[in-house]
């Protein structure tokens, strides 16, 4: 499952990020009643973690640099929530 942010124009929904899916892929669209600081922080963190996860090679042990990067993001996220 992939969650992304987007905007509703009144007629269509436009993603704010590139979506690498085939046309006519089924989706679930959720309209948020309101956005607060915690939900925005969570969505930002989710995006960052997704990018970090895409770089992770599951066949090898991650290096110290990767661990340091993901831990700093984790601490930063926790301080905002």
Image (cartoon, rainbow, N blue to C red):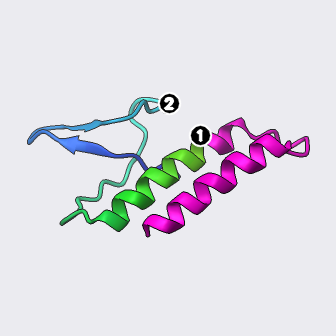
| The residue stretch that appears in magenta | 52-81
Q: Residue at x 43, y 39 (%)?
A: 25
Query: Which residue is tagged 1?
Result: 51
Q: Position of residue 72 (x, y in %)?
A: 63, 53
Q: Quadrant of residue 64?
A: top right
Of circles 1 and 2, the one toward us is 1
Q: Position of residue 42 (x, y in %)?
A: 44, 60
Mark 1 neighbour density, 10 Å: few (under 14) some (14–19) many (20 or more):
few
Query: Which residue is tagged 2?
Result: 20
Q: Most prominent secondary structure in the magenta stretch?
A: helix
| Quadrant assignment for the C terminus | bottom left
Camera-nearest residue between 25 and 31: 31
Give the left or right position of residue 34, taking residue 55 as reference: left
Q: Is residue 29 magenta?
A: no
Q: Position of residue 12 (x, y in %)?
A: 17, 37
Mark 2 neighbour density, 10 Å: few (under 14) some (14–19) many (20 or more):
few
Q: Is residue 79 magenta?
A: yes
Q: Residue furthest right?
A: 60
SS assignment at label 2: loop
SS assignment at label 1: helix
């Amino acid at each position: 499952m992939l969650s992304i942010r987007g905007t509703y124009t009144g007629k269509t929904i436009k993603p704010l990020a590139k979506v690498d899916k085939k046309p006519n892929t089924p989706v679930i669209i959720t309209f948020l009643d309101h956005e607060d600081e915690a939900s925005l922080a969570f969505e930002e963190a989710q995006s960052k973690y997704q990018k970090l996860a895409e770089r992770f090679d599951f066949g090898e042990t991650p290096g110290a640099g990767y661990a340091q990067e993901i831990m700093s993001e984790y601490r930063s996220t926790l301080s905002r929530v």
